[in-house]
Amino acid sequence: MDPRRALKAIRRVLLGEPLALSAAVLALYPMLSQARWRRGGLALYVGGWFLGRRSVEGITLGRTVFLAPWSTQTPQLLLHEFTHVRQFAAVTAFPFLYAWQSIRHGYRGNRFERDADAYAAQMIAERSLRPEVRHVVKHTATSVVTIERFIIEEERNFPDATGELSGVLYDMALAAKMIANKVRSAGLADILGSAGAENVQGEIQQKLDVISNEIIIKAFDHGGRLCAMASEEEPGIIQIPEGFRTGKYVMLFDPLDGSSNIDVNVPVGTIFSVYKKITRGPRGEMEDMLQPGRRQVAAGYIIYGSSTMLVYTTGQGAHGFTLDPSIGEFLLSHPHIRIPNAGRYLSVNDAYEQDWPDATRALMRRYRGLDGERKSLNVRYVGSLVADFHRNLLGGGVFAYPSNTKSPRGKLRLLYEANPLAFIVEQAGGLASDGRRRILDVDPTDLHQRTPLYIGSKSEVETAIEFLSTGEEPPRRRREDGQMESA
Ligand code: AHM
Ligand code: MG
């Protein structure tokens, strides 16, 4: 064997390999760059032996932190190990004191361990409790964090990842750029207005709905990552054409939400939701589509506003990227979005007030400060879900689309709208409910099923649940044909 290669292999066993922390984590906790990070190494096993285990998740020696190859780079773990770096720097006899503490009080009772846990918890809480200190990444002229780099770095947290899910996210970023381009030129090209056809919900389709639907289907149907799709604009499952490879994910999407607003230049958006296939065989089945939202593996939305932004989650926080049109790339701009716990905004269409159940009316009076119990929220309603949701996600507040006598289950769709946004809001520290149940726990029965929706800041959604969870059904109305409206 080549001696240089042998030396390298020995070095790898002893010292592991250098590890670059993800850009999102560093953006949020810049102090972590003061430590040297490595993956693997003998020290992990020696530390494990000392503590009576096979290995430990991380071990710190001086300024170097060794992380176990299978450990997930959670902020908790990284900040914990970083505290040991600081302890090493502050106390010369740290290793001896640490050993002494462990012998006397055990691993858990060791004061250096307790200090490290406390520091990590405090830093994480500071980030989430002070959302007004909104973190926006500044890129330099020569160094940027693209969505691609971010996805690759996030994927490293899953040693078993095959890259397929990352591929789904890239494809969506590409489709988003193509749709953004169409939306931007909508006023210039002759593509405004209705395409004449009605969609499955009985609404008039705008031309851009049709175009966006097609862009997404074409971006995904031969990539080999999905085995089926479902779109708000199509009645049934969209299968991958014969002859193309199928993958292990299904995706549900609303290609252009709020499209009735395009004519008046109001922001619109795309919403998507990804699940792992649960049935056997290469094709996606209805069972794969009708999974509860808590099983989503990824979800996101794109807002085509004054700038185009893509926000997504894979269950490791919600992260926002802004499209830089000069280089045609989504750049990390809002890592680890945290929604303020209490709201500033209330977004609801109160033209339906006369059709709301009493409990909903009482809830809205509370939000508006009319029952004297609290200060009023500011009312902001664009009528474009993605725009209303996005503003409240960053600024705090609640979006509500209650059930009413005309629409006993509300208007919004569980699978294309409520579930993906619920996944994101929960990852940002907020809540989403239909008034009684957590949205992510609802078992879907129909591809196009609707749901009432209360989504946003935790304390505001909790207020909604408090008012609405009494089990009261919305009052029914007599239809023009004399029959009672069904729920
Ligand atoms: P769409 O999917 O047909 O575009 O409808 C959904 C839109 C949402 O963007 C928005 O929140 C809601 O409809 C507004 O409805 P309303 O006009 O009843 O307030
Ligand atoms: Mg929609």
Image: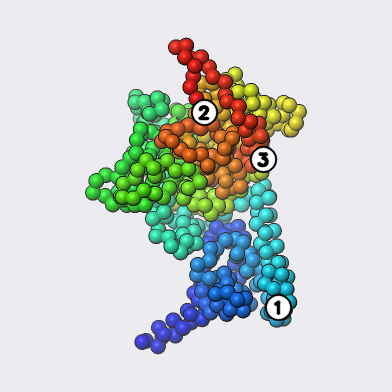
Looking at the image, can residue 171 be seen? no
Mark 1 to mark 2 CA distance (whole Å): 61 Å
**Residue behind mark 3:** 459
Which part of the image, by quadrant, shows the N terminus? Answer: bottom left
Tag 3–tag 1 contact (CB < 8 Å): no
Type of amino acid at the residue the image marks with label 2: Gly
- Mark carried by residue 209: none
Q: In this view, does 351 lie to the left or right of 415?
A: right
| Residue at image location 65% in from the left, 38% down from the top | 462
Type of amino acid at the residue the image marks with label 3: Ser
Looking at the image, can residue 332 be seen? yes
Type of amino acid at the residue the image marks with label 1: Ile
Nearer the observer, disc 3 or disc 1? 1
| Residue at image location 44% in from the left, 81% down from the top | 9
Mark 3 to mark 1 CA distance (whole Å): 45 Å
**Residue behind mark 2:** 410
Tell me where residue 487 appears, x and y as whole percent. Answer: 50, 25
Q: Is residue 131 left or right of residue 178?
A: right
Tell me where residue 279 appears, x and y as whole percent. Answer: 36, 48
Badge 3 crowding class, 10 Å Cα cut-off, few under 14, some 14 to 19, many 20 or more, is: some
Which sits earlier in the primary sequence, circle 2 or circle 3? Answer: 2
| Residue at image location 56% in from the left, 34% down from the top | 434
Which sits earlier in the primary sequence, circle 1 or circle 2? Answer: 1
Badge 2 crowding class, 10 Å Cα cut-off, few under 14, some 14 to 19, many 20 or more, is: some
Q: Could you tell me which secondary element the residue under label 3 belongs to? A: helix
Near-viewer residue (370 or 405): 405
Q: What colour scheme does the image use? A: rainbow
Q: Could you tell me which secondary element the residue under label 2 belongs to? A: loop
Q: Could you tell me which secondary element the residue under label 1 belongs to? A: helix
On screen, 407 above or below 30?
Answer: above
**Residue behind mark 1:** 103
